[in-house]
Image (cartoon, grey):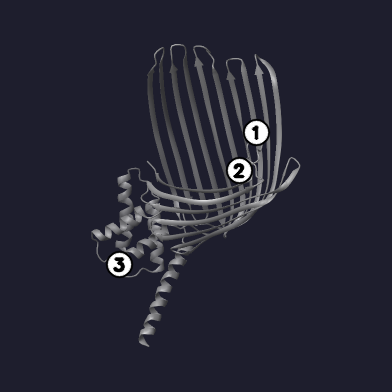
Amino acid sequence: MKKNVLAFLLCITAHSAYCQQDSLLQKFKFRINHYQALNYGANASTGYNKTDFTANSIRNSSGNGSISANYSAIKSTDKILLTTSASLFVNAYSSSYKSLSNTNYNKVYSVAPSFSLLNKWFTNKKFIELGAAVSSSYSANKGTSTNYPLFAKNNNGFYDLQITTGIGCGRLENITDMQNALWLYNDLKESSLLSRPLSADELNELGQAITLANNTRVLDVRKRTQFILETVDNYLQQKGLISKTDIHYFTHLNDILFFANNSQRLSGTEKFIRLTPGIGGCKQNQTQYDTSVYNNHYTKKSVVLSVGFSKFLPAKLTRQNNYGAFAKLAIMDNNMSLKNYQGGLLVTDIKVKATLKQAGINAFFQHAIYPNTRTIINVIISTEGGYQDFEQETNFYGHINLTGGLNYFVSYRTSLIGTLGAGYTKNEYYNNQSFERIPNDLQLYGSFGVVVSM
């Protein structure tokens, strides 16, 4: 009888502990007043090749150089959630081909900036959101030849602007730091390195300490590593929670803070009404042999109204269920003008206008398994279906996708990734210049590889 009572009490204690952890995940609030990050890179390459034939000698050479920069910032308080990102990519390429009878030179320059911002203002669990995302690119290509002094010249410009406005209630919180705080707590407890169990408030504070450590900008990577370790260690030491600080304690701390999977994990429910107007277009001018000129102008306008909800539920530390659905009304209008000049005379003038209208429902469900600190197994099913009108031709459209994924986190720079999936598409269109129809098809796919970030 005593054994049965003891076993029952142990089960109740274990169940209460896990329920406490589930509750902490669901109620954790990611708060950081301001965080910024800047990544930049440069790349250069060159090549040379010479081939000698009996009656000719051919030499090929090329050079390429690029620079890139990415900026991101986040502010998460009780009243504001602001995310900002910007990027710039610049590339230059040149090549040459030389033989006894001809010499060709080709030069390409391109630049592609982008910027996005989304701000949500919260009051009494309700929010108003306003954001914008803009991207553009420009490239110039010029080829010359001894036989054709103006062999080819091509200029391409592209832009796209999306505005997001919306209202709703609820909030989705990033709980990755709380997840890792619980992993660390369980790890230290199993290794008998804690002087006593942590209360719910102390576990929440540990999660906040990890948030502070991860989201304080320290430029020197060695100083950043030191800062993260010291911030979390200081909290544990000040609370008197560590029974001994030896090499085993340090390795457990280092393993969770730097080698646990940090893919974003969310918690909460959000209901929304969102309006997203957009405008974009491109301009292409191409000249060949100094006689043929092609001018292609393309503009697109769109507006999407969506009403729906999404729910992200951390059922356990090792389980996550996410699902949601929204109804949408969309109108997309494309205009294209194509002109061809030969010897200065207009020989072709084509204008195409196309409008696509859709009314549909989009839904998704995701089940994620976290068997340990480094592994995520995902099963996701997503679908969209509805009714559409394309130039007075009406029909039903839709697609469904089922994907299974594995992500093993080796380090911040390296991950092992595997994917298996299947999908089916019916009566859908590419949102390009002339709304080309996608063939109805069934897809089966799979991949496995290593992702390394330098």
In primary-sequence order, the first of circles 3 and 1 is: 3
For the C terminus, give its image quadrant. top left
Disc 2 element: strand
In primary-sequence order, the first of circles 3 and 2 is: 2
Between 137 and 147, the one lying in front of the other is 147
In primary-sequence order, the first of circles 2 and 1 is: 2
From this view, report whether residue 99 is shown above or below residue 43: above
Residue 270 visible in this rendered orientation of the protein: no
Residue 151 visible in this rendered orientation of the protein: yes
**Amino acid at pointer 3:** Leu
Disc 1 element: strand
Q: In this figure, which residue is indicated by the disc labeled 1?
A: 299
Q: Residue 112: x percent and y percent?
A: 51, 33
Q: In this figure, which residue is indicated by the disc labeled 3?
A: 194
Q: Residue 182: x percent and y percent?
A: 39, 63
Q: Quadrant of residue 428?
A: top right
Pointer 2 local density, CA inside 10 Å: few below 14, some 14–19, many at least 20: some
